[in-house]
Every structure is written in structure tokens, then in C-alpha cells.
Image: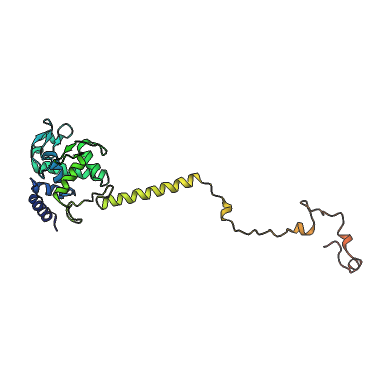
Amino acid sequence: MSEVSGASGIAQELSRAGVSYASEIASAAARHGVDPKLLAAIAAQETGGPGANAGRNIVGDGGHGRGLFQIDDRYHDFARSAAAMDPAQNADFAANMVSGLLHAYHGNVREALSAYNAGSPKATGTMTEWMDGQRLSYADSVLRHCEKLGEPTPPGTAGAIDSTPSAPLDSRGQLMEQLVQELAQTNALQSFASTTLLDGSAFAPSFACAMPPSYAQLSGLDLYGHSRYDVSYAGLLSDDDSSSGGDSSVI
């Protein structure tokens, strides 16, 4: 499936679910690798309201929020340009932001949504009261809009996303996770090497080999070559040896 045809099919699906600017949202989602239903749910949360699947192209938030995704002109130069009120460019800017936040928070959708709304992955953000009386944080409200739009886009198609916290978004996320694990192992080995004294005896054989006696030990000499015994070698020779004609001075 090509990116263009995939985005077109997803746009039709979103349109059937009542999403306004479905084509712009699907195209922006495909370009930035974001789940199109998640992106549509953000638009519904920002400018649609509880129970709505569609957002609107308006100026809101006291005049600071621009367009379908309410890009804030206090923080983004883009929001101070005319392009901010163009649904296609507004959706593209929002999709790029969401993609960056998902990567920054390792695919954790709740943290990315909280940061999109309030600048912090742990923030509660804007509270929304639904028709059944439930008051939900910004992230949970967006995810409820997602449920209304149906199941996430199947894996392998444009913009698919795993909403499981800390799940890698794509192969780059998986590679980064692998590198982090390998770095941790390397650091652990370096720490072990720098703090542990290796005992060479641990590598020695379990049996001991005695050194053979030296010539000095066998001959009864001390360290200076003198006999340790109070006896001369001549006295050790027998009478037979002394008369044999041999040189008695040679041992």
C-alpha cells in the first residue's frame, strides 16, 4: 500500500466516522508516522468537545489557540502566521509535534498527550467533563475520543502506533532501546572492573607442587657453600677408597 493510497483510504474511514478535515489529518499523520485516529482524536478534544468526533478550524483559548489543533501563539511562531489557520498546515504542524513527543517519551501516548497539552508528561492538563459525568484528564479524554473512532490503524499501515506505555514507536525506537541496554551493561562491567580486586589464587590449581631440592640442600652446604656438618669429606672416604689410586681431592 503506498503512502498516498493508504492516507486516502484512512481519510475515507475517518470521514465516515464524522471527522472533519479527514483528508488533511490523514495526510499529516502519514507524513509524520502518527496514528491518524489519535491525531483526529486530538482535534476533536481541542476544538470539538465531548461526544464529538470532529474538530473545528477556529481561534480559541482567549485568542491564543489557532486552528484545528489550537496551536498556541504564545509558544509557537507558526501560530502567529496566516498558515496557522489553514487546516492542512495546522494538522501538519500538530502531527510533527505529536511525533516528536512520542519519540521523546518512548511511545508512551499518555505522556506525549500530557506534554502536548500542558508541557509536562506528568501533568493532568485540561479537565473535560463528559456527558456521563466522568471528568477526565486531557490525555484520558483524548484516548476516549480514540475509542469512539474505533480500533487503532492496523500495524504495518501508515501511522500505526502501539498505545502500550513505553512501547517503541518504530525501528528507531527499538534500536535506541537496544543501545540503552548495551550501554547499561557496559557501564556495569566498567564499574565492576574499577571496584573489584581480583585474587590470583582463585585461578590457581587446587594442588600444590613442591620445588625439587637444590644441589646445596642435597650436598649439605649452607648459603655460602660451606658444609653444614662438622666433618670433612676426606673423613668420609673409606680406606679402600683412599688406596685405590684415585684423586681423593675430587668428590
Q: Position of residue 219 (x, y in %)?
A: 79, 59
Q: Residue at x 17, y 37 (%)?
A: 128
Give the quarter of the figure containing the N terminus. Answer: bottom left
Q: Residue at x 32, y 49 (%)?
A: 177
Choose between 74 and 218: the one closer to the eye. Answer: 74
Residue farthest front in this picture? 132
229 vs 106: above or below: below
Q: Residue at x 34, y 50 (%)?
A: 179
Q: How many marks?
A: 0
Choose between 55 and 92: the one closer to the eye. Answer: 55
Q: Position of residue 110 (x, y in %)?
A: 24, 43
Q: Position of residue 65 (x, y in %)?
A: 13, 34
Residue farthest top in this picture? 62
159 vs 133: above or below: below
Q: Position of residue 178 (x, y in %)?
A: 33, 51
Q: Is residue 225 left or right of residue 161?
A: right
